[in-house]
Amino acid sequence: MPRASQLLAVGLTFPQTRAIVGASDTGVTATGTTLATAYNVVAPITICTTVAASSGVVLPVSNTPGDSFVVFNGGANALTVYAPSGGKVNALAAGVGYSVPVSNLARFTCIDPAGLNFATG
């Protein structure tokens, strides 16, 4: 994937570059201990810097197949990443979160037209 500086250098505007490369949400504090109380992911790249025990984030529901989100865990505890309500990650049951270890990232790719189910990789 091209870097933002490369796209800007060939003449793309900043909004066009952001659409290609994606925006990031940095300094995120993971919240809650359930799907209902987790922090809502708002950008294609989410960097969690504060992760209390059992806290997490939830992926957005308005996706199309192929949309992906990268979540980095820069906190002190494992980070729980939930699919939207009614969805699931990999073969986990609906509502069960996927655990991202400390100092690791995971890419979640939408795999269904309803935008609820994700695969990691």
Image (tube, rainbow, N blue to C red):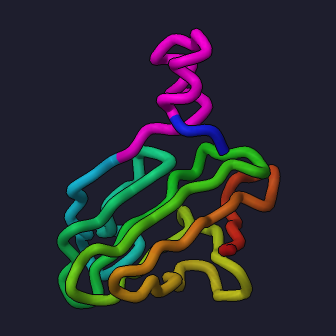
Along the line of sight, which residue is nearer the eye, 39 or 49?
Answer: 49
Residue located 51% across and 11% down the image: 13
Residue 72 in the image: x percent, y percent? 40, 68
Where the N terminus falls, by quadrant?
top right
Residue located 33% across and 60% down the image: 47
Along the line of sight, which residue is nearer the eye, 103 or 40?
Answer: 103
Residue located 73% across and 45% down the image: 64
Where the C terminus falls, by quadrant?
bottom right
Look at the magenta stretch and give its main secondary structure.
helix
Q: Quadrant of residue 87?
A: bottom right
Q: Quadrant of residue 112?
A: bottom right
* Image side of residue 76 versus residue 121, left or right: left
Does 12 appear above or below 22? Answer: above
Q: Is residue 6 magenta?
A: yes
Residue 93 in the image: x percent, y percent? 64, 87
Q: Is residue 3 magenta?
A: no
Region rendered in magenta = 4-24
Does 113 appear above or below 47? Answer: above
Residue 6 in the image: x percent, y percent? 56, 29
* Image side of residue 105 versus residue 68, left or right: left
